[in-house]
Amino acid sequence: MSADQQAALERIATDMKASAQSLGEAVIRAERELDEAFKNQAVDERAIRDATTRIGALNGELRAAPLIAHLKTRQLLSNDQVVAYNESHGYSVTPSPREHKH
């Protein structure tokens, strides 16, 4: 792996961790706010729907963060490096016995 690739991979990892941490904190904060409002009976149906929609969106962004990082990582690598990367992350595809052709 080249020095440029290594530096780019480190940036991707750093950015992903920062994004995931920030999003995770936002999810926790939004969940607490909803719980508190519900406990205090300070919500109606619309407020619950709005809060849960926001929490769902935040969870979606949180789920996307590592997937986008993997995508960006693959784009930096050669085909051989992608194979090694996939294997190191458990993504290698091995043909099942039914797919094996002679």
Image (cartoon, grey):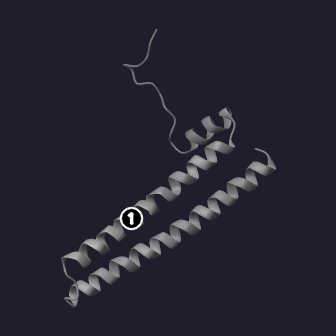
Q: Quadrant of residue 47?
A: bottom left
Secondary structure type for disc 1: helix
Residue at 57% x, 47% y: name it: 71
As drawn, the residue found furthest toward the front would be: 46
Q: Quadrant of residue 15?
A: bottom right
Residue at 44% x, 58% y: name it: 63
The x and y percentages for residue 76 are: 68, 44
The x and y percentages for residue 23 are: 48, 70
Q: Quadrant of residue 57?
A: bottom left
Camera-side residue: 1 or 18?
18
Is 76 drawn above or below residue 13 in the view shown?
above
Camera-side residue: 32 or 37?
37
The x and y percentages for residue 13 are: 63, 59
7 with respect to 101 (left or right): right
Residue behind mark 1 = 57
Is 25 drawn above or below residue 97 in the view shown?
below
Q: Amino acid at mark 1?
A: Ala
49 with respect to 72 (left or right): left
